[in-house]
Image (tube, helix red, strand yellow):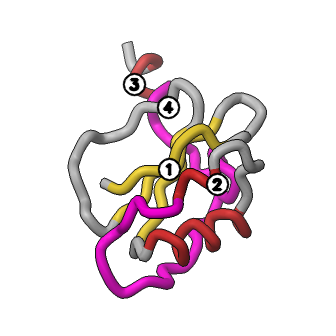
Amino acid sequence: MLLPLAACAGTGSEGPDSASPPAMAQGPCSHDGLDRFTGQKASADLGVELLKASGAKMLRWGGPNMAMTMDFRPDRLTVSYDDQMVVTSARCG
């Protein structure tokens, strides 16, 4: 009975970097110019670039079939990637 719930739980090893990149921005996230990251290989270094470009305080990686909360956070950037670790979208919230 616990198996389906365990499958949704994060292990901390998912995503391009098991540790969250440092918060580098001061204000809310901005979508402007984030399309240029689509198609790039997801990595910790790219995460730092995404934080700088968006102004977000935190970064959330979203892998294929990964469950994520739907709460809106104006200071958060969510970056989705595919099975090949290629960024498919970057959006605020």
Q: Earlier in the sequence, mark 4 or mark 1?
A: 4
Q: Residue 25: image x %, image y %?
A: 43, 83
Q: Which residue is mark 1?
A: 90
Element at badge 3? helix
Q: Which residue is mark 4?
A: 66
Element at badge 2? helix
Q: Label 3 is placed on what type of residue? A: Leu
Label disc, if present, on residue 37 of the rendered structure? 2
16 vs 50: above or below? above
Q: Residue 23: image x %, image y %?
A: 48, 80
> In whole angstroms, how far apart are the C-alphas of marks 1 and 2?
8 Å
> In whole angstroms, how far apart are the C-alphas of marks 4 and 1?
15 Å
Task: Specify start and end residues of the magenta stretch as a single range.
Answer: 7-33
Q: Label 4 is placed on what type of residue? A: Met
Q: Label 2 is placed on what type of residue? A: Phe
Element at badge 4? loop
Of marks 2 and 3, the one in the foreground? 2
Q: Which residue is mark 3?
A: 5
Q: Residue 52: image x %, image y %?
A: 54, 77
Of marks 3 and 1, the one in the foreground? 1
User: Badge 3: few (under 14), some or many (20 or more) residues near its Cα, within 10 Å?
Assistant: few
Q: Residue 16: image x %, image y %?
A: 70, 52
Q: Earlier in the sequence, mark 2 or mark 4?
A: 2
56 vs 43: above or below? below
